[in-house]
Image (spheres, rainbow, N blue to C red):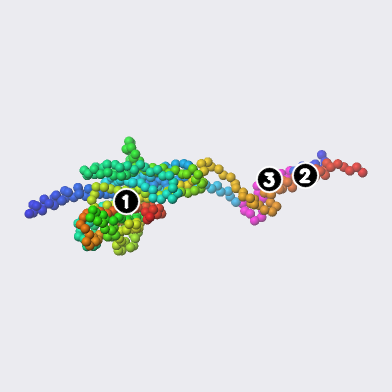
Amino acid sequence: MNSGRIAIGLVFIIALAAMLVFKTSTMPAGYAVTSVINATSASVTVNGVVDVLLLNAPVAFGGLDSGTTNNPASPTPMYVNYTGNTNVNVETYINGSNFTATAGFFAIGNMSYNVTVSVTGYANSSCNTSRCRYTIAPRFVFNETAPLGTAKNASIYHYIDIPAGQAPDTYTGSIRVCTEMIGVTVCRT
Amino acid sequence: MRKSICCFVFCLLFMAPILAATAPAYSLGTMQPINVYVTNPGKTVPIEFYIFNAYGNRVTHVIISVVENLDNLQVQLPPLKTNMWNISGIMTPIEENLYVEPMPMVAEKPANPPEGVYYLKTTNVTDYIPAKKVTVNVTIPADAQLGTEYKLNLMADANWYGELGTAQVSQSRPFSYRLVVVAENYSETLYNPPGEGGGGWSLGLSNEMVFGIVIAVLVIVILFQQFRPKRHR
């Protein structure tokens, strides 16, 4: 076996050894050994429960004379109870429709209200410190943090003005109380 | 006189609990399990939510409607029916998609639950909530682009009857949904747009491969030197 072939064999062995060493441990200057991170994901679905109980409804004012103002409802107030089943932060909007009867009608704006909320809720300041008039379009009245087992109450105190000269009859209007999870933004439209 | 007053007070005390028990309590409870559905083109998605009446003492009459469907998805609501109700002796026709009677919460699921009643469990209370399920079928267009996200808003309007009052009260509860369109089968391929993939002289070879090629060239040169035909002088 001549020295040339021995040299060739040595070159092969050195090349293979270098490839193994090079692959596993040789690092160019300026790099550090890094760890391998396998990333995955986790997901969870949260059920949204909203449970609202209205008490002292429908809203009744009894018999009134035309031309009178600020007549309170009886009984009062109407309670908006967010029961302990509710597990999300919620907000409530209200609106109404005109009072109608065979003899005629008068606008829903003749009915007004002011609201109170629990210590953890927030009321529309316009309707909290003073009165708001009902509108055809929904208006935000209050929101509440998730009751999570302990019911929370809000109250709506109603008042009505009877337009002067309104024809005698039994007038009926309607109130819509729309409650949604905060972030849904449908009740306001 | 004293006897009359005593009689009056006695009657009032006796009547008080009866009068209080009849005061209406209007309950609308809802559970929305999920608000995002992942679906495929041409598929029909059964959107589900629940309605319950755990604390009320009047039947909750519900109408379901679509309030926002900008993409004109095909939406099939539960059938709207006109049911005849006997309310305090007065026959009253009521149009509704479903009604939910007062169903107080229970500590355990009954062995034989009423048909159409589901028992919900929340983390806030230990009891089960009897509820009725609403299913709304939404069909995705067959030519829907993958990655499209549709938005759909539904509304449940609840009414109660039998009481007189100047202002009748109703409750509304919206349900907002997103429907995301994806391919039916999973696939993943690397996308190399034209003009990318490295510039200059880079051939995409690893260091080990370059070293090996160099060694191989050296070996070939050495072999050539060893076995090349010798010049005869």
> How far apart are the two marked residues, 1 and 3, measured between alpha carbons?
74 Å
Say which label, 1 or 2, has the lower sequence index.
1
10 Å crowding of disc 1: few (<14), some (14-19), many (20+): many
Tag 2 and tag 3, C-beta contact below 8 Å: no
Furthest toward the front, the residue is: A103
Tag 1 and tag 2, C-beta contact below 8 Å: no
**Residue A81, horizontal then vertical, whole percent:** 30, 52
The foreground one among B31 and B66 is: B66
Instruction: Tell me which residue sits at (67%, 49%) in the image.
Output: B204
State yes or no: residue A22 in magenta.
yes
- The kind of residue on which mark 2 rests is Val
**Nearest to viewer (mark 1 / mark 3):** 1
- The residue at which mark 3 appears reads as A20
- The residue at which mark 2 appears reads as B219
Residue B67 visible within the image: yes
- Element marked by disc 1: strand
The residue marked by circle 2 belongs to what chain?
A: B
Residue A51 visible within the image: no
10 Å crowding of disc 3: few (<14), some (14-19), many (20+): few
Q: Which residues are magenta?
A: A13-33
Q: Are marks 1 and 3 on the same chain?
A: no
- The kind of residue on which mark 1 rests is Gln
Q: Is residue B129 left or right of residue B178?
A: left
Q: Are marks 1 and 2 on the same chain?
A: yes
**Residue B51, horizontal then vertical, whole percent:** 34, 45
Instruction: Tell me which residue sits at (67%, 50%) in the image.
Output: A26
- The kind of residue on which mark 3 rests is Leu
Furthest toward the left, the residue is: B1
Asked if A174 appears above or below A1 in the picture, the reply is below
- The residue at which mark 1 appears reads as B171
Q: Are marks 2 and 3 on the same chain?
A: no
